[in-house]
Image (cartoon, rainbow, N blue to C red):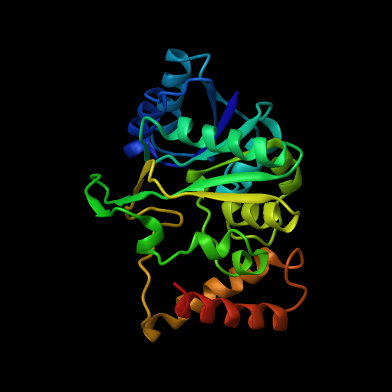
Amino acid sequence: MIDILLSTYNGECFLREQLDSLLAQTYTDWRLFVRDDGSVDGTLALIREYCVRYPEKILEYQDELGNIGSMRSFEELLIHCVSGEYVMFCDQDDVWLPEKIAVFHQEMKRLEAAWGADLPLLVHGDMRVVDQSLGLINESFWKYANLRPDLLDENARFLGICNDITGCSCMFNQTARHGALPFNPRSYMHDAWIGVSVIARGGKIHPIYKPTMLYRQHGNNTLGAVEYSRSLLNLRFRWKLARQSYANAHPLIFKNVLSFAWHKLRYLLTRHFSK
C-alpha cells in the first residue's frame, strides 16, 4: 500500500484535475489522505465530494489546528495518516501522468532489493514544467532549473546547499519517514527537509529522469519552478535561498556558516566545471 498525502489551500481551480489524474493511475494499491489548511473557497466541498464518491481511495484528515502553512500541514499528515509501505506527497494543482506511481514503485522495489528496507530510501523524478493551462514550458524541470541529481543525490553537503527533490515528485519508505519526524522547524519546505534527512542518515536517493507529471506554474504557487539564470541581478533571491538552505541543513549537515560557505563554493565550482 502507498499512502499519498495532499495538503490543500484554496485550490478548487485545479484540484479536480489532480484528483482525476490520481484515479487514472495504472498502479491502484494506494489511498489518498487530504488535509485542508483552512480554505475559504470551494476546496473543502470538492474534497468531500470525492471522499463520498471514492470512500476507499480518498479520505479527509480533520483536526482543530486551522491554517498552519504547507510544511506543517504535510507534517501532520505524515505523523497521523501513514501506515503503508511507502509515502508520496501530492500538490493540489499538478497533473500526474498515468504511469507515475507504477514507475516510482518499481524503483523503490529495486532500491530495497539492493539496499534493504531498513535503510532510508527515497526516489524522486523529473517533471514537465507547464503553464496554468498545461501548455508546455519545458520538458525537464531539472534542466529548466539547472539541477544536477548526479551531483546532488550522492553528496549530503551539496544536497544541503541545493535541493533537487520536489515533494510532489518523490516516494520514500517507512524508515525515511521515521527519520524525518519531527520536521526541522527552521526548514523552509517539507521536501528539502526530507531529502537532507535521508542522505544525512546514510540513506540512498535515486533520481528518475523520465518526467511522470505535469508541474503546473501559476500565480499562486507556494514554491514553483524558477528558471536558472547566471545573471547577478537576482542576488537578493540567491541570498534568500542560501539562508533558507543553511537553516534547513543546520545542524544535521552543516555545523556552522563557514562550513556551509566552503561547501557552497565547492558545489558551484563542481557544477560549472564538470559535465
Q: Position of residue 72 (x, y in %)?
A: 63, 47
Q: Looking at the image, which is closer to me, 30 or 142? A: 142
Residue 62 placement (x, y as % from top left): 61, 29
220 relative position to 157: left or right = left
Q: Residue at x 40, y 31 (%)?
A: 99
Residue with the most extreme front position = 114
- Quadrant of the rendered image containing residue 248: bottom right
* On screen, residue 257 above or below 70: below
Quadrant, the N terminus:
top right
Q: Nearer the viewer, residue 166 or 8?
A: 166
**At 70% across and 43% down in the image, what residue appears?**
176
What residue appears at the point 60 percent right and 33 percent down from the top-left corner?
109
Q: Could you tell me which residue is drawn at 64 percent across and 78 percent down? A: 263
- Nearer to me, 79 or 11: 79
Image height check: is 184 above or below 101? below
Quarter of the picture containing the C terminus is bottom left
Residue 132 position, x and y percent, is 27, 48
Percent coordinates x, y for residue 206 in the rendering: 56, 49
Left or right of 132 on screen, residue 121: right
